[in-house]
């Protein structure tokens, strides 16, 4: 096993970015209900070239063990990079782990000129000036070695900023502006085909990439639920009170029905249907990487969510994971939640899990309090 330290990005990430990294504790008014219940059963292992075997928090960062092609690497992710998603960690590690070619091409065939144009805004589309933009550029050197160099700038009076870097493959950027603003997720831009599998970035002065920072609202306590339940495979609804984590006979802040008539066996395709609803509300699906990037529930658009797979569906999958905004009690309760399930079932039923952060004050504010 080889041990390497990923290069340190010199950035001052705001404390809200550490939601998923160091602590699940909220503010003094926050609570956590029913932790440690059964999580949804994992799916069968695929043929992915890389996977994260384990993650362990330390005082200086996070130790991540990654398996690639039958070999395991131990990587130290510094605390300034804890906001990276698992996908980003795997992509960065896979680039570092790639063996050099027998006859390494010259760097000028691997690197490209990195032109980048950005625009900083607040969540009301107002121009933000003086926003600090920091990041990391990956540069190929002779011998197949990669160098990771920090970059930094700030937006001007018109909210614009740019980078013009002579050589590089990938540019990762983050934006921040003091404690009154919540920073957006990291953004990752690929310029060279050798830098990964993402589409190549096409810079445009006329269409700069937006970086939207959310103004922090007045702090409100959020109630946290993180546990698992089991539903009958016949579609009988499970009604859950999100403030207690308990199953209730009627009503329910969230109502889950799972139709899965045939037992799941690894490698087999079975028909299944998932229905998620709410009493006095509904759900809005979200295309986000993590719950802590979901800051305010929408005012409308809530409805029952249904996903269904036939045996012969081309996109068939044995499991489902989704992020949602959630409203119940006719607007008296708003939440952001992650839902996980697997079609494997046993005598307990079909296992599913919910991790939710709930505002019971009738407010759509779902911002995490700063550390």
Image (tube, rainbow, N blue to C red):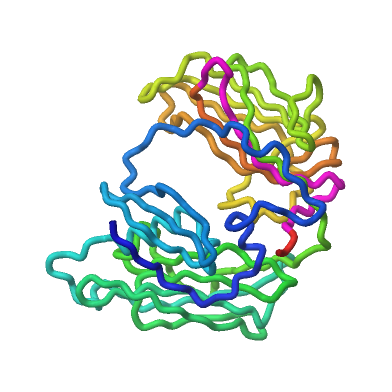
| Residue drawn at x 74%, y 35% as measured from the top left | 282
Residue 53 shown left or right of residue 303 in the figure: left
Name the foreground residue: 57 vs 153.
57
Q: Is residue 205 visible?
A: no
| Residue drawn at x 63%, y 17% as measured from the top left | 235
Magenta span contains residue 351:
yes
Q: Is residue 143 above or below residue 246?
A: below
On the image, which quarter does residue 311 sit in? top left
Q: Is residue 198 above or below residue 180?
A: above
**What is the quadrant of the N terminus in the image?**
bottom left
Name the foreground residue: 273 vs 92.
92
**What is the quadrant of the C terminus in the image?**
bottom right
Q: Residue furthest front?
A: 59
Q: Position of residue 25 (x, y in %)?
A: 70, 53
Q: Is residue 58 visible?
A: yes
| Residue drawn at x 51%, y 64% as measured from the top left | 61
Q: Position of residue 150 (x, y in %)?
A: 45, 79
Name the foreground residue: 190 vs 91.
91
Which range is magenta?
345-368
| Residue drawn at x 45%, y 20% as measured from the top left | 264
Q: Is residue 262 above or below residue 356?
A: above
Q: Position of residue 243 (x, y in %)?
A: 79, 37
Q: Position of residue 250 (x, y in %)?
A: 81, 21
Residue 218 shown left or right of residue 340 in the figure: right
Residue 122 shown left or right of residue 189 in the figure: right
Residue 187 shown left or right of residue 368 in the figure: left
Magenta span contains residue 347:
yes
- Number of marks in the image? 0
């Amino acid at each position: 096993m080889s041990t390497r330290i990923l290069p340190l990005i010199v950035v001052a990430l705001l404390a809200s970015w550490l939601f998923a990294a160091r602590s699940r504790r909220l503010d003094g008014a926050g609570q956590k209900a029913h932790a440690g219940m059964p999580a949804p059963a994992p799916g069968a292992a695929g043929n992915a070239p890389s996977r994260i075997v384990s993650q362990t928090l330390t005082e200086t960062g996070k130790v991540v063990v990654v398996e690639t092609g039958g070999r395991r690497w131990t990587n130290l992710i510094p605390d300034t990079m804890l906001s990276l998603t698992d996908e980003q960690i795997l992509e960065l590690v896979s680039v570092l782990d790639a063996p050099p070619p027998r006859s390494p091409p010259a760097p000028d065939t691997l690197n490209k000129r990195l032109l980048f144009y950005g625009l900083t805004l607040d969540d009301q589309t107002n121009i933000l000036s003086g926003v600090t933009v920091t990041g990391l550029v990956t540069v190929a050197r002779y011998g197949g070695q990669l160098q990771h160099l920090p970059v930094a700038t700030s937006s001007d009076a018109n909210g614009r900023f740019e980078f013009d870097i002579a050589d590089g493959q990938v540019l990762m950027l983050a934006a921040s502006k003091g404690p009154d603003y919540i920073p957006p997720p990291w953004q990752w831009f690929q310029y060279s085909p050798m830098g990964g599998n993402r589409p190549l970035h096409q810079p445009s002065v006329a269409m700069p990439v937006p970086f939207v920072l959310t103004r922090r609202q007045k702090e409100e306590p959020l109630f946290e639920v993180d546990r698992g339940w089991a539903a009958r495979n016949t579609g009988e609804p499970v009604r859950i009170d999100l403030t207690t984590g308990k199953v209730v006979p009627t009503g329910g802040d969230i109502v889950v029905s799972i139709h899965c008539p045939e037992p799941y066996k690894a490698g087999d395709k079975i028909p299944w249907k998932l229905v998620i609803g709410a009493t006095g509300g509904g759900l809005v699906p979200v295309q986000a990487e993590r719950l802590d990037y979901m800051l305010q529930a929408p005012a409308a658009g809530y409805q029952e969510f249904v996903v269904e797979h036939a045996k012969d569906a081309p996109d068939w999958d044995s499991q489902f994971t989704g992020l949602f905004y959630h409203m119940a009690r006719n607007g008296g309760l708003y939440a952001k939640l992650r839902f996980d399930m697997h079609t494997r079932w046993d005598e307990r039923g079909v296992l599913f899990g919910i991790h939710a952060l709930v505002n019971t004050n009738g407010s759509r504010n779902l911002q995490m309090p700063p550390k």
